[in-house]
Amino acid sequence: MSTVDTPAHEVVIAQAPEERQQCLDVPSSGFRFSTSSRNSLSKRRSMSTSSPYTPSLSRLTRRIECRNEDISTHFLLRLVPSLTPIGTIRAFKSPHGDYYKLTRLAVLKDYRKYRFGRLLVESLHGWVQNHASETNTTGAAFAKVVCHSQLPVQGFYTKFGYAPEGEQFDEDGDPHQKMVLRLPL
């Protein structure tokens, strides 16, 4: 078995508008580990736009891309020194305040062999622990993290300690399972 040299990279929290846009621009083909509204968008892009019953793509794009954006933190995985984006993950605290949501995990196919999906999830978990500790007014011992996993990659999340909760469900035409992690603070 040969050793693969991992390319120089960094994970940053997307602060500037152009960094956030880079997170959104990681191609939907990069999505591998969980579903997102991006998958729904790519399926809708393949629908005929000539039908009077199909909403316009620009209207769909705005609606899908804007959902939860005002409360989201995006993590951008990029090569250095070129700053080429190769992966992303997004987190937000539920509007009800009782859990964090992991969404939009994507690593471009050519870079998956470097275990960058794991790196992005671990980066998100570190951020959740810090954010939850700073905003913890109830003395909670853990932060709840939720994701909707596509069934074929459920094992990926299990390796981090996520456990299935509830029944399987359909999201954007694919079977999913709600996965929950109680992350110690």
Image (tube, rainbow, N blue to C red):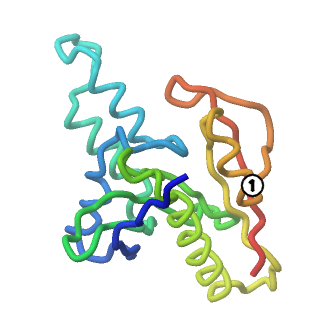
Seen from the viewer's position, the closer of residues 181 and 37 is 181
How busy is the neighbourhood of tag 1: few (under 14 within 10 Å), some, or many (20 plus)? Answer: many
> Where does the image place residue 64, in percent across and percent down from the top left?
36, 43
Q: Residue furthest front?
A: 1
Closer to the camera in the image, 89 or 61 = 89
Circle 1 is placed at which residue position? 162
- Quadrant of the frame with the C terminus: bottom right
Residue furthest toward the top?
A: 51
| Image position of 120 (left or right of 41) | right
Q: Secondary structure at mark 1?
A: loop
Write the residue at 60% across / 77% down.
126
Between 58 and 116, the residue placed more toward the observer is: 116
Q: Is residue 30 above or below residue 123?
A: above
> Residue at the spot x=63%, y=33% of the render?
152
Q: Residue flagged by tag 1: what amino acid is it? A: Tyr
Quarter location, residue 46? top left
Q: Nearer the viewer, residue 1 or 98?
A: 1
Is 126 placed above or below 119 here? below
